[in-house]
């Protein structure tokens, strides 16, 4: 079972800065072969606020273990305000998903 993604989101001067730390092994083909395990890494990440997508990315096996992601978006464009929840979801190669939420401060 995957652990929760740690999320910190702060609204300052109309810009929301999000820092997210996903808990995942991120085994590339090479690392998996050495560890005699199956390759598996996060392939897709999406973040939403009030149903609006504010961050979306397809990733590869070249992210580090427990990847850290930082991004910003304009609060005005999505109607975001302090106290709103941000929903952060990732999907890995095996189809496992993890959805975590955080509060915008």
Image (tube, rainbow, N blue to C red):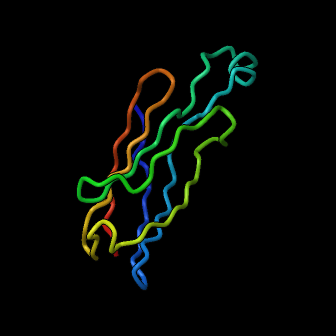
Image coords of residue 103 (percent x, y): 31, 66
Quadrant in which the C terminus is drawn:
bottom left
How many labels were placed on the picture?
0
Q: Residue at x 61, y 33 (%)?
A: 26
Closest to the observer: 93 or 24?
93
Closest to the observer: 63 or 80?
80
Q: Quadrant of residue 8?
A: bottom left
Q: Is residue 31 left or right of residue 16?
A: right
- Residue furthest out toward the bottom: 13
As drawn, 90 above or below 20: above
Image coords of residue 32 (percent x, y): 68, 20
Quadrant in which the N terminus is drawn:
top left
Image coords of residue 59 (percent x, y): 58, 38
Image coords of residue 17 (percent x, y): 47, 70
Q: Is residue 83 left or right of residue 98?
A: left
Q: Residue at x 48, y 29 (%)?
A: 92
Q: Residue at x 23, y 59 (%)?
A: 50
Q: Residue at x 63, y 41 (%)?
A: 65
As drawn, 80 above or below 54: below
Closest to the observer: 16 or 79?
79
As drawn, 90 above or below 50: above
- Residue furthest out toward the front: 77
């Amino acid at each position: 079972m995957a652990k929760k993604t740690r999320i910190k989101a702060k609204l300052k001067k109309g810009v929301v800065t999000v820092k997210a730390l996903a808990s995942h092994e991120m085994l590339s083909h090479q690392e998996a072969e050495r560890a005699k395990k199956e390759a598996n890494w996060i392939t897709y990440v999406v973040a939403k606020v009030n149903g609006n997508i504010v961050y979306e990315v397809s990733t590869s096996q070249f992210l580090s273990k427990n990847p850290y992601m930082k991004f910003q978006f304009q609060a005005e464009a999505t109607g975001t305000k302090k106290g709103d929840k941000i929903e952060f979801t990732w999907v890995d190669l095996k189809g496992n998903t993890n959805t975590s939420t955080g509060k915008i401060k």
